[in-house]
Amino acid sequence: MVRKGDGVYLDIILWESQDKWDAAMAKAQTSEAVGAYFSHMVIDPENMEEGVERCMQLRSFAKG
């Protein structure tokens, strides 16, 4: 999680694939834990993807 200079928080999650993202979003819609987490954000529970921005990872820089 990071906070931008304007005070907006970003929760950055790297997914292995689009299929895993889709499965997680489907599961999230019925999860109490996810509901409690998202309750701290301004997100429409009927549209969990609204306010969620997906970006493509271009490159990873790992030590090794």
Image (spheres, rainbow, N blue to C red):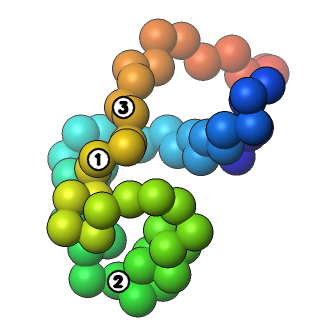
* Residue holding disc 2: 31
> Counting other residues with Cα less than 10 Å from the Cα at mark 1, is it few (<14), some (14-19), or many (20 or more)?
few
* Residue holding disc 3: 54
Query: Which residue sits at x=26%, y=82%?
Result: 30
Q: Amino acid type of disc 3?
A: Arg
Q: How far apart are marks 3 and 1 (CA)?
A: 11 Å
The image quarter containing residue 28 is: bottom left
Q: Earlier in the sequence, mark 2 or mark 3?
A: 2
Query: Which residue sits at x=29%, y=47%?
Result: 50
* Residue holding disc 1: 50
Instruction: Measuring from the top left, give residue 23's x and y in whole percent.
Output: 22, 60
Q: Please identify, in this view, whether the residue under mark 3 or under mark 1 is nearer the observer.
A: 1
Query: Which residue sits at x=46%, y=58%?
Result: 42
Q: Residue furthest bottom?
A: 32
Q: Nearer the viewer, residue 35 or 43?
A: 43
Q: Amino acid type of disc 2?
A: Ser
Picture layout, residue 41 above or below residue 37: above
Q: Earlier in the sequence, mark 1 or mark 2?
A: 2
Q: Distance between the residues labelled 2 and 3?
A: 21 Å
Q: Is residue 36 left or right of residue 20?
A: right
